[in-house]
Amino acid sequence: MTPANRTPVRVGMFGLLGSGNLGNDGSLEAVLGYLRAEHPGAVVDALCGGPEVVTARYGIPATRLHWYRGEYRTASRAGAIAGKGLGKLVDAVRTAAWVRRHDVVIVPGMGVLEATLPLRPWGFPYSLFLLCASGRLFGTRVALVGVGAAAIGNRPTRALVRWSARLAGYRSYRDALSRDAMRAMGVDTARDKVYPDLAFALPTPPASAPSGSPGPVCVGVMDFHGGNDDRARAEEIHRRYLDGTTRFVRALVEDGRPVRLLTGDECDRPVVAAILDAVDSPLVTAAEAASLADLMKETAAADTVVATRYHNLVCALKVGTPTLALSYAAKSDALMDRMGLAAYCHPAREVDAGQLLEQFRALEKRSAELRRTLTERNLTAARQLEDQFTALTAALFPAADHAHALREAK
């Protein structure tokens, strides 16, 4: 408990939280669980994409990340362009003022140092740079905790990401590839550690016992258009992904398998609608998941999971369900390797329904063995995340105590 005569530690949470991405919110939930268990006296708030959702769901005050409400809409008219430009200046002041009110700011997980999906430099990379620069300016420790990173081709984006990482006071990564990517971009990672994704710290629902006969399959879909360097062929990539995934779902239905479609972001819903319309079978249904806990319940009830979004994979692997990844980035391959399923990856850019079905059947033949492997790997992940939170306390909260002493001396 915080002593009555001492100001509580002020902790800020930062990111695209409450914006419809279940993986981002799951990372926030994991860190909030750690803070409430280990630092119950901390006063926590957020600067985030969906402040109303974050406040309603997690019970913490939250402020909108961007002053300009149309930040993520394409600006074509002069007024919208001017609004975006002015918003960048206003956000610099707003972010600095918010950071200055805190002892510690945590960026919980997320792929904040990567551009594996389409991303403009003056969007979130600029926001992250403002955060880390403000932290360095005002002596507020900024921690990038369990984040994802990847090599970035676009020069402005790469520069903003590199400087954000350099200015942060603490960094850890969700896989070794992320740490290697930051080292290749010129960041000193000698003291940076690698731990499992933060979502592995969330509570795990009980897995359903296999029925003994072919049971339901969860298929996690994504509004996938390629990465940041694929903009010229984004629609072609999307059509190929949707066509291959639809053909695979149809093949499962022809085998009499119930299929449950999963999403991980609000933007994935049109993909679900397209598959439902194309297959048109009572065996195909769509889940209404509002959190990673909901996704874990869905994947725990399945015999097998085939999924694209990174945190769909995390949820399935965490509950111990044999999983096949439609991999769109190296982070998915790294996750599958960490959990002992490296052989079961299929490229999301080149979905071949026939080959995918063969991999799926091979996966199911080893189901019992792979469930045992996942149980062992999950125990290891849990121990490693305990180490992550111990390291986080050692790195951040003594710094917060020092910051209090400085402020109170002024």
Image: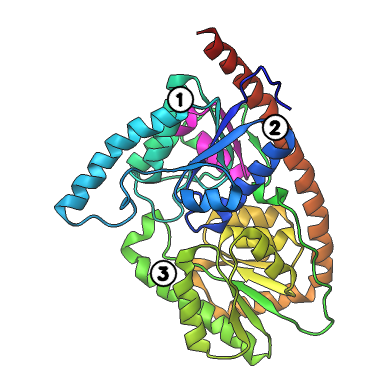
Amino acid type assigned to the residue bearing label 3 in the image:
Ile
Q: Is residue 182 magenta?
A: yes
Report which residue position mark 3 lands on. Answer: 237
Residue at image x 79%, y 47%? 380
Q: Which residue is mark 1?
A: 100
**Regarding mark 3 in the picture, which secondary structure is present there?**
helix
Inter-mark Cα distance, 2 to 1: 21 Å
Query: On the image, numbered disc 2 is attached to which residue?
Result: 39
Q: Is residue 113 left or right of residue 359?
A: left
Residue 241: in sight, yes or no? Answer: no
Tell me if 106 is positioned left or right of 194 in this view.
Answer: left
Does label 2 or label 1 sit earlier along the sequence? 2
Contact between labelled residues 3 and 1, with CB atoms less than 8 Å apart? no
**Could you say whether the residue bearing mark 1 is in a helix, strand or loop?**
helix
Q: Residue at x 57, y 52 (%)?
A: 25
How crowded pointer 1 is (Cα within 10 Å; few <14, some 14-19, many 20+) is rated as some
Q: Which residues are magenta?
A: 163-183
What element does badge 2 sit on? loop
Colouring used for the render: rainbow
- Residue 26 at x, y percent in the picture: 61, 52
Magenta part, dominant SS: helix
Alpha carbon distance from label 3 to label 2? 46 Å
Mark whose residue sits in front, 3 or 2: 2
